[in-house]
Image (cartoon, rainbow, N blue to C red):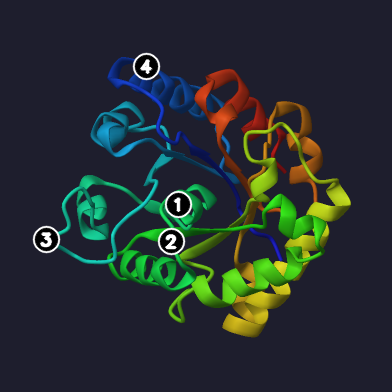
């Protein structure tokens, strides 16, 4: 099964207007030069930069995504942004369930599933993040944690066309540490089996599973060559044009 590689940049809470536009233009121009059609590229800037980044990547085939959303379409939710607002702004994707949201904002599987369902219903594609902490890995709970998060966070309406799973070992995000390639492949293969159980084999075979724990130019080629790794959700390395485009170049 051939799955189109997705390299997604999660800028997190980084970037003021001038530097955000420059970064987006740089990524867009470099990706356009490649002429590649076998790889999809996505940037997810903070809410404050979405409109400006949309203009900066116009005509480059780089897609626009947001880092989170509320599950309601509208209403008394001060400080929140709805999926339909993101869609109206030109977003194609939204990230939900990132470990930083799960930890810092105490988001549950149930809440993440509601956000994902609302986003899909609004016409967005969702990237649902899962992953274990260092304590969970050390106690041998990696597969169980990821299984529970998939079963609880992925809505019943998810398909390979509207949903991407991102495996992010929490202990590897931003630390420079990464699991071995065999460990990554073991978890990704397990994730695909769980997706098959929840959504059926056809969806499991076609659904993309990204790796997102400190992927960088020096390890991207090795990680992206793994059979069940269909791309990357890139944090720190997505903030530098040269690093991000090097990861894109390393994709299969």
Could you give the CA–CA distance between mark 1 and mark 2, rounded to whole angstroms?
Answer: 6 Å
Q: Which residue is mark 4?
A: 19
Q: Who comes first in sequence, dot 4 or dot 2?
A: 4
Q: Quadrant of residue 209?
A: bottom right
Tell me the element at label 4. helix
Tell me the element at label 2. loop
From the image, state whether disc 3 or disc 4 is nearer to you: 3
Crowding at mark 2 (Cα within 10 Å: few <14, some 14-19, many 20+): some
Residue pictured at 16% horizontal, 52% vertical: 78
Q: Who comes first in sequence, dot 1 or dot 3?
A: 3
Q: Quadrant of residue 148?
A: bottom right
Crowding at mark 4 (Cα within 10 Å: few <14, some 14-19, many 20+): few
Q: Which residue is mark 2?
A: 107
Front residue of this view, candidates 116 and 162: 116
Give the image location of residue 129, x and y in percent.
54, 57
Q: Which residue is mark 1?
A: 101
Q: Residue furthest left?
A: 76
From the image, state whether disc 1 or disc 4 is nearer to you: 1
Give the image location of residue 118, x and y in percent.
31, 69
Q: Who comes first in sequence, dot 1 or dot 2?
A: 1
Give the image location of residue 65, x and y in percent.
38, 46
Front residue of this view, candidates 237 and 139: 139
Residue pictured at 31% horizontal, 48% vertical: 91
Could you give the CA–CA distance between mark 1 and mark 3, rounded to whole angstroms?
Answer: 21 Å
Specify the quadrant that holds the C terminus: top right
Q: Who comes first in sequence, dot 1 or dot 4?
A: 4
Q: Which residue is mark 3?
A: 76
């Amino acid at each position: 099964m051939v799955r189109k590689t997705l390299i997604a940049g999660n800028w997190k809470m980084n970037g003021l207007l001038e530097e955000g536009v420059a970064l987006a233009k740089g990524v867009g121009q470099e990706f356009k030069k490649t002429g590649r059609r076998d790889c999809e590229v996505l940037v997810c800037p903070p809410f404050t930069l979405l409109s400006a980044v949309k203009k900066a990547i116009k005509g480059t085939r780089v897609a626009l995504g947001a880092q989170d959303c509320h599950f309601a379409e509208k209403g008394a939710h001060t400080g929140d942004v709805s999926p339909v607002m993101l869609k109206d702004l030109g977003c194609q994707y939204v990230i939900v369930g990132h470990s930083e949201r799960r930890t810092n904002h105490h988001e549950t599987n149930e809440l993440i599933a509601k956000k994902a369902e609302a986003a899909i219903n609004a016409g967005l594609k969702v990237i649902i993040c899962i992953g274990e902490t260092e304590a969970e890995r050390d106690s041998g709970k990696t597969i169980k944690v990821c299984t529970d998060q998939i079963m609880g966070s992925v809505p019943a309406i998810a398909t390979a066309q509207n949903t991407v799973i991102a495996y992010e070992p929490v202990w590897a995000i931003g630390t420079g540490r990464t699991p071995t390639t065999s460990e990554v492949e073991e978890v990704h293969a397990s994730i695909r089996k769980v997706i098959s159980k929840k959504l059926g084999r056809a969806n499991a075979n076609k659904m993309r599973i990204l790796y997102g724990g400190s992927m960088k130019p020096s390890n991207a080629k090795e990680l992206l060559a793994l059979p069940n790794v269909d791309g990357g959700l890139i944090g720190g390395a997505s903030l530098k044009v040269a690093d991000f485009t090097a990861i894109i170049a390393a994709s299969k």
